[in-house]
């Protein structure tokens, strides 16, 4: 049997594809490449450019590849953008998940792993936050994920489909072996932005808000290494395949770092003192959110990369690799241009 991975050409989806391959699983990738990259999908992995909301396409994939599980990443994820354009997020994240779930039920699938977010919690009243905390999203992004969670719960109650919802905290790092990292142009992830600034790919970066009720006034987040997060999806799928009940699980390390702490760590690891400008708060940002992931740990999740400097180091290695690739491509283009410019005249 095979697993359909929607959004498998993206940052988290791509690392999960690697985790599946490393374990000998068969992943089938469906991605519309709106933010993902074809290069993120290893050669030999079946890859289809398409939309998760295309029920006919998804039905054909399930039948043709004998798919028994779906791991659903495909979504829009930028919180401020969701505040500015909420309908875009409700359509992409909620309406299309509805279509995907309908197809899964129609095709009698039994296993579904859903990529959700700690954004469903909003500003939790206590920290670390457990899965029993009352959801209170601060943004259409968080609400779109929560609405999808509610649909999943109702579908599981009314059908044979069982699911695990993973509520991610802040995802960082890159594949330790250097095979993949965050490549999305204009990405808003703090660690990526800070590293790009240190490597002079950005003139400066912004710290959004310094008046939050935290020790240094900046937002606190729980950063989880993307490769550890990828492994969590295998744990979730194993749970379902072994007959486990539907679950909603946090995925984080239980340790928070402020924006200023992350910026200082990037400066220390890169050895570059770059400009981090103070800016106004962004809409939809909670002050502090840290995970209680005891339930996921109890299922057998064993994170191995719980170390902020290591996450930054892996992400930095990837950014340097990207810079080298871009420079090599530009030299190749320049060489081609020179050769064409000096081509001999035809007789």
Image: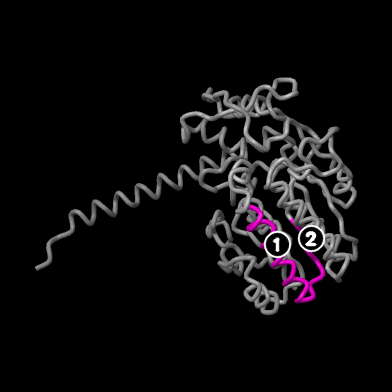
Q: Nearer the viewer, residue 86 or 43?
A: 86
| Residue where numbered disc 2 is placed | 151
Residue 301 horizontal/vertical position (percent): 83, 49
Whichever of labels 1 and 2 marks the residue nearer the N terminus, that label is 1
Percent position of residue 155, x then y:
82, 65
| Nearer the observer, 195 or 188 | 188
- The residue depicted at 75 percent of the width and 23 percent of the height is 213
Could you tell me which secondary element the residue under label 1 belongs to?
helix
Q: Residues within 10 Å of mark 2 (few under 14, many from 20)?
A: some
Q: Quadrant of the C terminus?
A: bottom left
Residue 269 against residue 32 in the figure, above or below: above
For residue 143, above or below residue 104? above
Query: Marks 1 and 2: CB-CB under 8 Å?
Result: yes
- Secondary structure under badge 2? helix
Q: Quarter holding the N terminus?
A: bottom right
- Number of marks: 2
Instruction: Decide which of 17, 339 is in the foreground and name it.
Output: 17
Query: Which residues are drawn in magenta?
Result: 89-114
Does the rendering let one see residue 319? yes
Relative side of 83 to 20, left or right: left
Q: Give the x, y percent position of residue 296.
A: 85, 49
Colouring chosen for the image of the structure: one colour
Please identify the residue farthest to the top as the structure is shown.
216
The prevailing secondary structure element of the residues shown in magenta is helix
Q: Residue at 76%, 39% (x, y): give it.
A: 122
Residue 94 painted magenta: yes
Marking on residue 97: 1
Taking the image as shown, residue 265 lies to the left or right of residue 301, namely: left
Count residues near mark 1 (Cα–Cα under 10 Å), then give few for <14, some for 14-19, many for 20+: many
Q: Residue at x 50, y 45 (%)?
A: 322
């Amino acid at each position: 049997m095979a697993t359909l991975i929607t959004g498998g050409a993206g940052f988290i989806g791509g690392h999960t594809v690697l985790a599946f391959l490393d374990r000998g699983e068969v992943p089938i990738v469906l991605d519309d490449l709106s933010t993902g990259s074809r290069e993120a999908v290893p050669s030999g992995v079946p890859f289809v450019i398409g939309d998760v909301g295309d029920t006919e396409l998804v039905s054909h994939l399930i039948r043709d590849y004998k798919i028994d599980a779906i791991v659903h990443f495909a979504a829009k994820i930028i919180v401020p953008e969701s505040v500015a354009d909420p309908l875009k997020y409700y359509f992409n994240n909620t309406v299309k998940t509805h279509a995907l779930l309908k197809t899964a039920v129609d095709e009698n699938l039994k296993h579904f792993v859903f990529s959700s977010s700690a954004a469903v919690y909003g500003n939790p009243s206590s920290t670390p936050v457990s899965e029993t905390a009352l959801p209170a999203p601060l943004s259409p992004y968080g609400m779109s994920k929560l609405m999808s969670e509610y649909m999943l719960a109702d579908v599981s109650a009314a059908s044979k489909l069982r699911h695990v919802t993973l509520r991610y905290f802040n995802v960082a790092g890159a594949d330790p072996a250097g095979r993949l990292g965050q490549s999305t142009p204009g990405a808003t992830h703090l660690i990526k932005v800070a590293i790009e600034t240190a490597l002079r790919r950005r003139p400066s970066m912004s710290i959004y808000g310094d008046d939050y009720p935290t020790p240094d006034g900046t937002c606190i987040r729980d950063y989880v290494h993307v490769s550890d997060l990828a492994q969590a999806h295998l744990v979730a799928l194993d749970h379902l395949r072994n007959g486990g009940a539907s679950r909603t699980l946090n995925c984080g390390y239980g340790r928070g770092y402020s924006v200023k702490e992350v910026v200082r760590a990037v400066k220390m690891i890169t050895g570059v003192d770059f400009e981090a400008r103070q800016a106004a708060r962004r809409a939809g940002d909670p002050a502090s959110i840290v995970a209680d992931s005891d339930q996921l740990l109890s299922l057998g999740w064993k994170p191995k990369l719980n170390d902020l400097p290591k996450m930054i180091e892996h992400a930095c290695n990837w950014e340097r690799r990207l810079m080298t690739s871009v420079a090599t491509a530009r030299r190749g283009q320049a060489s081609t241009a020179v050769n064409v410019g000096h081509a001999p005249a035809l007789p």
